[in-house]
Image (tube, coloured by chain):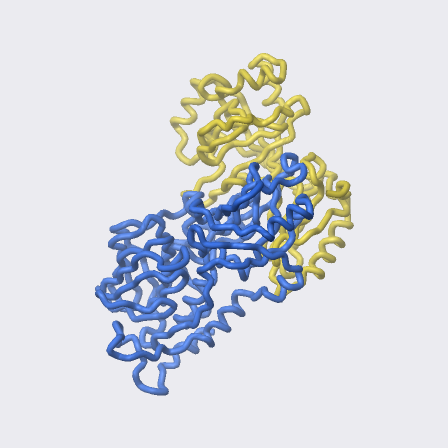
Amino acid sequence: MSADPRPDCPDIAPLGVDGLLVRFSTRLDDAANRAVLGFARGLESDPPQGVVEVASALSSVYLRFDPAVVSRAELTRALQDRAATRDWSTPMDGVGRHWHIPTAFGGDFGPQLAETAALLGMSEEQAVADLVAHPVRVLAIGFAPGQPYLGMLPDRWDIPRLKDITPSIPASALVVAVRQLIVFSADTPTGWRHVGQTAFRPFRSESDAPFPLRPGDVLHFEAVSHDEFDRIRASDSDGSGGARLEVQE
Amino acid sequence: MSGQLTIHSAGPMVTVQDMGRSGTLSLGLSRGGAADRLALIEAAALLGLSAPLAAIEMAGMGGVFSTDTPTRIALTGAPMRATLDGVPLDWHGSHLLPAGARLEIGPVTRGAYGYLAFAGGIETHPVLGSRATHVNSGLGHRLAAGDTLPLGPDPAPDAPALALPVEDRFSGSEIRITEGPQTRLYSASKRERFIETAFRRSTHGNRQGVRLDFDGEPFTAEGQLGIVSDVIIPGDIQMTGDGIPFVLGPECQTIGGYPRIGAVIPADLPRVLQAAPQTPLSFRFVTLEEADAAFAAETALLNRLRTAAQPRIRDPRDMADLLGYQLISGATAGDELKGD
């Protein structure tokens, strides 16, 4: 692959007959993800003619189009023009959605916290304090319905995935690897390390609003005692798990 | 008159499917819908509908069904053994299903996914804009004995029974693919070996994707462990970490970090998903221009098939559903032209 594209000049390549992939970076980095979120938001609020679906991943935006309405060449030009209007990696104004999510760390609720802290050269208490001190952005939603990829944590959290997959980690678990966090939508086998547990369900199929999170939302994990977590979980009826949503204008 | 469908027995993977969801990809929910989209379009053509409706998808094995109201049905996709009150029914055709009659659908004779569609469609409550069961996401469920489903009214119960000539897409063969953003992560020699390899559809396959078996070295890419996850779509040929190819299906995950050597063109995707285990499959790169030329919008496809669907002409002694035919020469109710 060639050198990384510039934020105002992403690579645009076909993905299937009726799709285009707009790629802001070949790696995951914070600036590229900001560009992805800003560019995708613009496409959703003001879609180019013929675009039927927009989805963002960590470093790229996918568009599906109707070839009967717009040709690949026409749409590619329209996207190039749009990309060139600004540096998409600079933060955009807009409403910020901040979630505060009660989380139990360590013990049975985070059996791999100890080894994670050891990799960081910290005590478990220090590792938890460091994690909760850094709010994380929903970089992308995917793999499973509603499931957020969250980041970026500081460089010291660049810890590899496990080679040996843990057979099943429960839904709503908080896991960490490569400067990112995930809150699982469902019980999942994974190579990410299980450090905490929330009662927040990122996918609520029975609800009128099945997807609480959106790309770009900010999550603040708040450490609670195991007893308090048990109480929160026992009284939870809708999957919110005691989370509080704060919308900042 | 709307009615009710009763499932008296069902194979292991019998689900309600339509054309899937649009707009949920960014929320982690793939499009889903019929594994063989063409089969739902064929059903709409056979039933004189202006758009495909939700129908029953049957993987490998059908079930036993009855309705409390007469309705036309269409049988499309992979051919299955079907009888109406014990009398064999033609596949790739429409039939009248009288109230209370017993429709028995057995195993596929070729291919993987057969479809039972109703002229009024299945009218379960849509979730996120679709009635499609998304097995992996827990939306809807596999149908089982005792389930009942609401049916919409047949808009033209007296319309003649039709048949549709169908090109074989149940026997594999050569599949056209286009290059994608990661194709060039594979060296020229690996890409060449990929198109020269005689693959077989593995026994591991479902609505999420179909694994390909082959003899020879795995297909690993340059720097494949450092690939940042991208959006993945049905038709993508994704390699696992061990270099084994999977062709992704309607319920594929939405983001993936494994490299993709190319994408099956939409016109050929039913041939892959309809391939039964051990069916031979091979691949050929085509240019985007060739892929564009082979692309047909689904509405255009339906219009073409509606013209191709013709009244069945058969020996009346062989007809299980004599009342389903328009027996007066040259006259139809004209209803098949309505609703456009």
Looking at this view, name the residue that lies furthest to the top: A123
Q: Is residue B83 above or below residue B309?
A: above
Q: Is residue B221 left or right of residue B173?
A: right
Q: Is residue A79 above or below residue B255?
A: below
Q: Residue at x 33, y 48 (%)?
A: B12
Q: Residue at x 57, y 37 (%)?
A: B241
Report the front residue among B217 and B175: B217
Please tell me how many numbered marks the rendered image carries.
0
* Residue A41 visible at all: no
Looking at this view, name the residue that lies furthest to the bottom: B330
Q: Is residue A109 above or below residue A3?
A: above
Q: Residue at x 59, y 52 (%)?
A: B196
Report the front residue among B317 and B208: B317
* Residue B284 visible at all: yes
Quadrant housing residue B231: top right
Q: Residue at x 50, y 72 (%)?
A: B303
Chain coloured yellow in this rendering: A
**How far from the left and from the top, in percent, is residue A225?**
47, 17
**How far from the left and from the top, in percent, is residue B233?**
56, 50
Quarter occupied by the N terminus of chain B: bottom left
**How far from the left and from the top, in percent, is residue A223?**
53, 21
Looking at this view, name the residue that lies furthest to the front: B216
Q: Is residue B183 above or below residue A202?
A: below
Chain coloured blue in this rendering: B
**How far from the left and from the top, in percent, is residue A193?**
54, 25
